[in-house]
Amino acid sequence: MKQLLSKLTFLWIVTLSSTLLLSCDQKHSIEYEPAYSSIPLTTGDEVLIIGVHPLHNPKRLHEVFGPIVEYLSQNISGVNFKIEASRNYAAYDKKLYSRKFHFALPNPFQTVNSLKHGYNVFAKMSDDENFRGIFLVRKDSHIKKVTDLKGHAVSFPAPTALAATLMPLYYLQQHGLNVRKDIDIKYVGSQESSIMNVMLGNTTAGTTWLPSWRVLSKERPELAKELRVAWKTAPLPNNGLVARDDVDEKIVSKVKELLLNLHQHKQGQQWLAKMELSKFEIATNDTYEPVVDFLKRFNKEVMPLN
């Protein structure tokens, strides 16, 4: 009997220890927010943080934007740039609006809001026709028209994702649904997750923006085989590039010059292709007036924005 109790006690301790370790690992995984740079810092160089909103998961974000950030560090003396990923839109918003980033690539909604926190637009991603939301459904789905979604769950990346959430919600509202009552809104954290929720049948439809769908469906052909684009929203100005108002104007000017000319050389073209982008182009705060107008309509016709 004593031997049995000893064995049971030992098993209980092992189980408890494993649970505690797993809990710690999970907590670390949730809180970890990687920052990437492979350029060694030079003593005395100023470190400037570039914050890219969660277009992709952190690993892919580094693969896509890491080479460009390194290119900036290599070509602007006295400065090292560091890209910082955020685990979700809420975390990114908090950093952007608290002015943690020296430079940032926010979505247009965040771009407009950043102007209230001392940022200014100096350029933007081109190809505005790509900045639109799309709705994905399974090819074997019975969904034919927007009102068929009534009573169903729809996945969205995050409340502040403009192309992939706000624009699709506005589209649904304009096509016969009361989005606050007629659908079950699921905010799932990322573009990839919104797509996969449809693929796995967790939601009847899911939204993303066009470039994310193009990239993911190329990498995972089974998605294109099983899913179809049901509807597309109208476009708005693409993602902005902003600089904090206390960053040296000479540095901003050099960053602007380098980014605007990426499409002029082969390496830059390859980097841009990973973003499904042809080039960066000149922009100002006024470029985003159409976004301001859209947000006013959304606030009035769909739901109040926090």
Image (cartoon, rainbow, N blue to C red):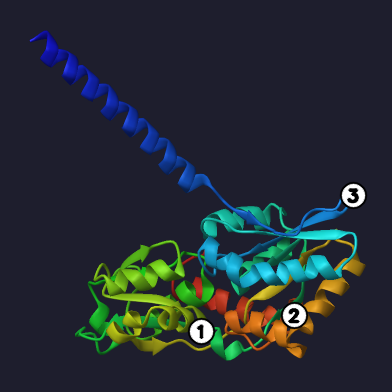
Q: Nearer the viewer, mark 3 or mark 1?
A: 3
The answer to whether 282 is drawn above or below residue 111 in the figure is below
- Residue 266 in sight in this render: yes
Q: Residue furthest left?
A: 1
Would residue 146 be visible to someone looking at this image? no
Q: Position of residue 180 (x, y in %)?
A: 35, 68
Pointer 2 local density, CA inside 10 Å: few below 14, some 14–19, many at least 20 = few
Tag nearer the camera, 3 or 2: 3
Q: Disc 2 residue type? A: Asp
Q: Which residue is mark 2?
A: 286
Tell me the quadrant of the picture where the N terminus can be found: top left
Determine whether label 3 and label 1 are within 8 Å by CB.
no
Whichever of callouts 3 and 1 sits on the residue coming sooner in the sequence is 3
SS for dot 1: loop
Local secondary structure at mark 3: loop
Residue 44 numbered tag: 3
Q: How many marks?
A: 3
Amino acid at the residue labelled 3: Gly
Residue at (79% x, 69% y) in the render: 72
Question: What distance separates the C-alpha of mark 3 from that of mark 1?
Answer: 43 Å
Q: Earlier in the sequence, mark 3 or mark 2?
A: 3
Point out which mark residue 132 bears: 1
Mark 2 secondary-structure assignment: helix
**What residue lies at 61% left-to-right and 88% top-to-bottom?**
128
Indicate the position of residue 233 as horizontal and vertical percent values: 46, 86
Q: Residue type at mark 1: give it.
A: Arg
At x 24%, y 76%, the residue is 150
C-alpha separation, residue under disc 3 versus residue under disc 2 = 37 Å
The residue lying toward the viewer, choosing from 232 and 136, is 136
Badge nearest the viewer, 2 or 1: 1
C-beta proximity under 8 Å, tags 3 and 2: no
Front-lying residue, 68 or 297: 68
